[in-house]
Amino acid sequence: MFEQRDIPNSSLVEFQIDHESGTPLHLQVEALLRDLIADPQYQNGELLPKEVDMAKRLGISRNTIRQATNKLVHEGLLVRKKGVGTTVGKPSYTSKLKNWFSFSQEMDEKGLEFINYNLKSGWIKASKEVAKSLQLKKGRKVLKLERLRGLDDGPFVFFQSYFHPRVGFTGKEDFSRHLYDMMEEDYATVPSISKEEIKAILANDELAKLLNIAPGAPILLRKRIVCDPGDRPIESNVGYYRGDRFSYSIDIRR
């Protein structure tokens, strides 16, 4: 475990502020902390210098340091652990609700290379809930697709998709491709409408193991029914996102 320590001489950041500047001290400290966050040694998990040491070095009050630190903690850029210290937070990935691309398209939009940790498909008999979402009779055979996905530091989302037979999937498709592009290009099925429900839940033992989190940790549950231009359902999808690694933003216009 890293120990909180004095400001290292090896830091790439010039550790100083301008006391004569018209820019408020807490804003200068905030900018300095943002530079520290980008420093490779802190990206690798090393604890940031103690607030009291930074205050001494910069010749300012500890409250000024705390004010700047609190703002970055609130943004999720820093994580403060009592009795341990402050570290750079892991990135949290955001998707806007107005965009309902497939996961792989969302990641491509952000320039992120995701990993399929597990991907499997097979035919099942539709449960009552799945049959209702796809407007089928209970027990009708549907293709089920499961995908555990994330980045090189681990998975952060588990998807379960069920497809209406009218799409034409056989189960032998390359589901590492962009799902909705494949539907449109290979099966003449155009995903046009997405009906979504999002809520917070707690991870059960199975989800905790898949997503490498503790049982009872917060998860973002996203249910999606994708329809064609005629408002006919073609996919019923459930996504379980790690609450500390993913968020949604909403643009609202009056």
Image: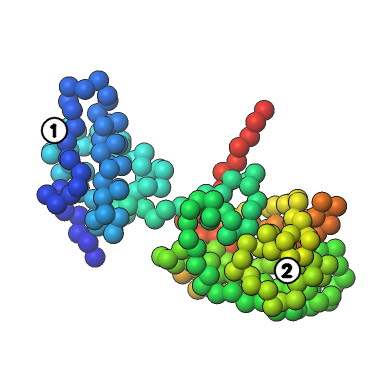
In what quadrant of the picture does the C terminus appear?
A: top right
- Residue 6 makes an appearance in the image: no
Q: Given the image, on which type of amino acid does mark 1 rest? A: Gly
Q: Given the image, on which type of amino acid does mark 2 rest? A: Tyr
Provide the residue designation for mark 2: 162
Category of crowding for the residue at label 2, using alpha-carbon neighbours closer than 10 angstroms: few (below 14), some (14–19), many (at least 20)? many
Q: Residue at x 20, y 44 (%)?
A: 13
The furthest residue to the front: 185
Q: Residue at x 26, y 50 (%)?
A: 39
| Picture coordinates of residue 242, whole percent (x, y) | 51, 60
- The one nearer the camera, 15 or 180, is 180
When the figure is inspected, residue 28 is found, relative to residue 206, above or below; the finding is above
| Picture coordinates of residue 225, whole percent (x, y) | 74, 57
Looking at the image, is mark 2 or mark 1 earlier in the sequence? 1
Q: Residue at x 15, y 48 (%)?
A: 7
Q: Is 18 on the left-hand or right-hand side of 180?
A: left
**Disc ID at residue 59:** 1
Secondary element type, mark 2: strand
Secondary element type, mark 1: loop
| Picture coordinates of residue 53, whole percent (x, y) | 15, 44
When the figure is inspected, residue 203 is found, relative to residue 194, above or below; the finding is below
In what quadrant of the picture does the N terminus appear?
A: bottom left
- Residue 57 makes an appearance in the image: yes
Q: Is 118 on the left-hand or right-hand side of 83?
A: right
